[in-house]
Amino acid sequence: MAEKNPLFEHVLHYMDTALKEQGHKNDSWQVQELKSFKEILALTIRAKLTDGKYHHFQAIRIKHRNPYSTGLRPYGGGLRYHPLVTIEQMKGLAMDMTLKNAVVGLPFGGAKGGIAIDPRAYSFSDLKTITEEFVSELGDSIGPLLDRLAPDMGTDARIMSVIANKYISMNQRRHIPHPDAVVSGKPVAHGSDGIHGRKIATALGGFYVLKSLQEQRVLPSHTLQAVVQGFGNVGSNFIKLAPSFNVKVIAVSDVNGGIYNPEGFSFKELDEESREKKTISKFKKGQKINNKTLLTLACDILVPAAIENVLNKENAESVNAPFIFELANGPTTPEADKIFKDKGIICVPDILANAGGVTVSHYEWLQNTRTRRFSMEEVTDRLEKRMQINTAEVVKTSVRYNTTLRMGAYHLAIERLIGAFEGKHEGKWPDENDFPFFNE
């Protein structure tokens, strides 16, 4: 496995802060429940690839906690293919997923997994074989009512389709209800069981959060100039949707570097450049800049949309944006977060800002288990309402605790989770008015 990742410690730091402020004792069963994990699987996959040789890969699947697991509410979370997949990183992301579900009112536990592999180094045929072996090794630990997988960094709708097909073939004689619901992010075309809008869900949900914050006067309502770090699925779709939400993207980067143009960029042109040259860093209609410089550009809103820990104590003082919008998971370290607070920079946390993806994954699960298809209009209407309602709850909670939006989101998630834990184990369900989930 690759080197240790600090994301887990960062999530614990924010959780500990919120728990202490709420008066919970560290040795209470509720806190111990939140800080422990249901299951940690570390697997070695053996796969025979197209070169005729057997190869071995390290894989992980982790379930955090699920206070709603009554046999009808599964765990859920992404599957990542990246060389730096580690147990510590997956623990942090699984815990992050539990909190994210709670923030937007989804009654599911958090999970995460991945394979330590660079998917760019393998053909789709080889990736298909590796994925199928992974599903075989996971066996009965996944399922539509146990643990639902979803796309993440390095995986896409094709990989999700492979997972669904393999799981269905493995269980065709067991009569498992709705086996296609074992995974979300499946293709929509050609009669597949995918859902409309899943590909753009994270970015679109983010814009609904922005819209809600503007309506509550947390963010200004004028045209926002944005800098986007990352041109993967989330970053590119943020740029694609930006004009519809009065946002102008003036700089963007990928792993090879960045480009800047104060007049903004055309998504169509950037997309064509990326498809043709596999990078946008050499796009001629923008000034070349490096990734470090991109994070320090003057703008209204800085949007980290790629990897963890890009905003840290080394560069936080140089950030020139009054607002940071975390479309990536864990892009800001606690040290940077404190600097931003001291500077008056408002940070919209990942467990709220990028929760559109998990929300639409939930709708896909509902679609599969209820055997009915949602239209694009239904998906976007449901997504907008859920994101707006729960963004308002985060703002109210941050005011109630006199704290930042990040800690407001953590406080809200922990209140909801502990309320659900106590309801499940002690029958102490909170009053409906104090537990404002918005459920379909």
Image (cartoon, rainbow, N blue to C red):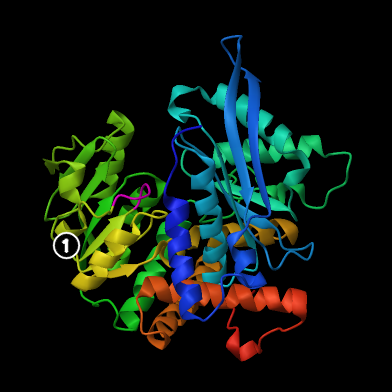
Indicate yes or no whether the magenta region holds residue 15.
no
Query: Is residue 107 shown above or below 295?
Result: below
Name which quarter of the figure residue 60 lies in.
top right
Query: Is residue 174 shown above or below 205?
Result: above
Query: Is residue 223 shown above or below 153?
Result: below
Q: Position of residue 145 (x, y in %)?
A: 75, 56
Q: Is residue 276 left or right of residue 434?
A: left
Q: Position of residue 19 (x, y in %)?
A: 51, 74
Q: Is residue 200 visible?
A: no
Question: Which sits in the foreground, 146 or 5?
Answer: 5
User: How many residues crowd around disc 1 within 10 Å: few (fewer than 14), some, or many (20 or more)?
Assistant: many
Q: Is residue 148 visible?
A: yes
Q: Amino acid at mark 1?
A: Cys
SS assignment at label 1: loop
Q: Is residue 253 left or right of residue 409?
A: left
User: Residue at the spot x=31%, y=31% of the render?
Assistant: 278
Specify start and end residues of the magenta stretch as a single range: 305-310
User: Residue at the spot x=71%, y=33% of the render?
Assistant: 137
Q: Position of residue 171 (x, y in %)?
A: 82, 39
Q: Position of residue 276 (x, y in %)?
A: 30, 30
**Magenta stretch, main secondary structure class:** loop
Q: Is residue 260 left or right of residue 243?
A: left
Indicate yes or no whether the magenta region holds residue 306.
yes
Name the residue tied to disc 1: 299
